[in-house]
Image (cartoon, rainbow, N blue to C red):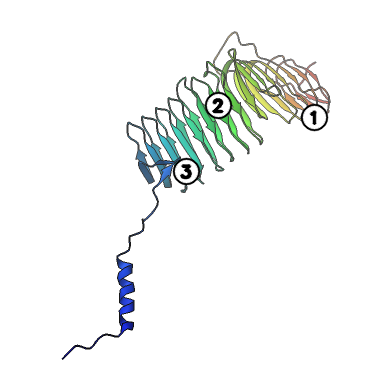
Amino acid sequence: MRAPSLPATVLVPVLVLAGTLVGPPSPAHAATTCRDQAATIEASEGTVEGTPGPDVIVVTGTNTKVLAGEGDDTICVVGGAGVVGVDAGPGNDVVDTTAAGVPTDTVLGPGADTFTGGPQSDTVRSSGDAATDTVATGAGRDTFTTYANGPVVVDLGPDDDILSFNATAGTAGSQLDLGDGSDLLLVEDAVDLAIDLAEGTLVQKGVVSKAVHAEDVQASGRDVVVRGDDSDNDVRVTGCRVTLSGDGGNDVLAQIGQPAQPDPTCKVKATLRGQGGKDRLRGFSGRDTLIGGRGRDIANGGSGRDRCSAERVRRCER
């Protein structure tokens, strides 16, 4: 007796199911890249260490710290939470935080390094050798500090930023652009320092650097000269001989101290000139000269026998 045939309608779903099972599998995810290079190391949490050679490191996750080590490394920070720390180490390294979305803290080591930031707040420290580091932090409230012996090329982009320039560093001129916003230029422990915000220059020990788009200055050194520009400048200086002048804005010009190290040749004296605008001038302990210039100005001589010319004066003996 012949077995009965199955209806054709029963065979159809079986054939379709079989075709589904034998199809090629889909990839789980696309290969991770950093600046068009395939990642050799991926990290999502904790501390990750690079190899002695060139690495391509991609960082995602929470509170991750990267110790890239030696070699010419490429490091990308992509998403995450908390603060991501990067120590690029020796070598000509590239650090990219354009897609980080969280604050980053990066140390650039010896070598010619490149840093590119994004809209978040980036903190970058350059602590290398005589090679040139190039830093563009993008938007966000960023902070850049250099301890390097060589020049740096810096663009801090929009928002209110801080650039700290180590006065003992640099045998060649740097390019410092603080970008849009209300930005602060810090210079510490200078010997002979002259900053001209109107001309966009910073001169220390005879080395000329470009320094543009800084509105405010805090500086310390033996002899310090600062000239403002047409914006409202806030200039505060610690030094022996201090010469400050504003320009067209409503400025604050002040000597706020003298060098901490005892120096018998340090004769503290400040000369402050407000020029145009409604300015506030403040001397320190020496025989200071405070001249308000045009506008309704306020002068406070501090201690010492001071000479003042302003609409409102305080602690001025002449």
Q: Residues within 10 Å of mark 1 (few under 14, many from 20)?
A: many
Percent across and percent down for residue 309 are 81, 20
Q: Residue at x 41, y 43 (%)?
A: 58
Q: Secondary structure at mark 2?
A: strand
Q: Is residue 195 above or below residue 117?
A: above
Q: Is residue 186 above or below residue 14?
A: above
Percent across and percent down for residue 282 are 72, 24
Q: Quadrant of residue 230?
A: top right
Name the one closer to the observer, 298 or 26.
26
> What residue sits right under mark 1 in the picture?
278
Task: Tell which residue pokes out farthest to the left in this image.
Answer: 1
Q: Residue at x 46, y 36 (%)?
A: 95
Q: In 3D space, how far apart are the residues under numbered discs 2 and 1 (Cα atoms)?
A: 35 Å
Three-letter amino acid code at disc 2? Val
> What residue sits right under mark 2 in the picture?
153
Q: Secondary structure at mark 1?
A: loop
Count numbered badges in the picture: 3
Name the one closer to the observer, 53 or 287.
53
Percent across and percent down for residue 124 are 50, 33
Name the one closer to the observer, 150 or 233.
150
Task: Tell which residue pokes out farthest to the bottom in this image.
Answer: 1
The reply to whether dot 2 and dot 1 touch (C-beta < 8 Å) is no
Percent across and percent down for residue 129 are 45, 21
Q: In 3D space, how far apart are the residues under numbered discs 2 and 3 (Cα atoms)?
A: 25 Å
> What residue sits right under mark 3 in the picture?
83
Position of residue 257 in the picture relative to residue 45 (left or right): right
Judged by depth in the image, the label closer to the viewer, 1 or 3, is: 3
Three-letter amino acid code at disc 3? Val
Q: Residue at x 46, y 26 (%)?
A: 112
The reply to whether dot 2 and dot 3 touch (C-beta < 8 Å) is no
Q: In 3D space, how far apart are the residues under numbered discs 1 and 3 (Cα atoms)?
A: 42 Å
